[in-house]
Image (spheres, grey):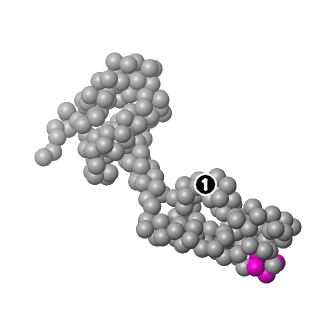
Amino acid sequence: MQSDPAKQLERNARLMELLARTALADQQAFAELYRLTSPHLYAVALRILREAAPAEEVLQESFVNIWHHAGSYVAAKSQPLTWLTSIVRNRCLDQLRRRELETVTMDDEEEGVAIAAEDPTPLDMLLSGADTRAVRGCVEALEPTQKQAIALAFFQGLSHSELAAHLRQPLGTVKSWVRRGLERLRDCLDRAGVTR
């Protein structure tokens, strides 16, 4: 069902006016903008996120963003509803990325158990104070990415998912850095004869 072009033009003009007034911190204009556009924008968020609570959260965040950035809307570049929809869509994509980073797979849990169940970890050896120079040399021999990931995991207590978010790297990459770093550290400490 196509909308009447005259009504569409009238609606666009009204939304442009409301955005301009919102840019001037007009709360009534903002409330009207919300009333006119939130059903459509919520439907967009719900279609992308497929869950009501996250869609409502994204809608709220989007309107906070709209309140603060209404002055950046340029009518020559896009229709007002298109601009508003792009804000919601971008927030939804951010939400999906965050979910992906926060997802803990069974592999993570099993890997964590395996590391914890082994005989003394490199951290245990480090804390035992057996041969400080050898330990320092082994740590320094690690690749910078491995060293950073292991330091954050052990000294800051970050999980694999938190490491991935903190380092802005894929979960699998971070898990690989930690696993390979621990293997290299263990081998190096064994070769150095550090007592366990």
Mark 1: secondary structure:
loop
Q: Residue at x 34, y 45 (%)?
A: 54
- Please state the horizontal and vertical placement of residue 28, each as a whole percent of the image: 34, 18
Residue occupying the point 84% across, 69% down? 131
Residue 147 on image: x %, y %: 71, 64
Residue 84, picture quadrant? top left
User: Of residues 94 and 179, which is closer to you in this image?
Assistant: 179
Does 74 sit left or right of 181 as displayed? Answer: left
Residue 22 figure quarter: top left
Q: Up-down: is 41 above or below 152?
A: above
Question: Is 191 covered by the magenta stretch?
Answer: yes
Q: Crowdedness of circle 1 by 10 Å Cα count: few (<14), some, many (20+)?
A: few
Residue sitting nearer the eye, 82 or 134: 134
61 up-or-down from 22: above or below:
below
Q: Is residue 171 above or below residue 71?
A: below
Q: What amino acid type should be assigned to the residue bearing mark 1?
A: Gly
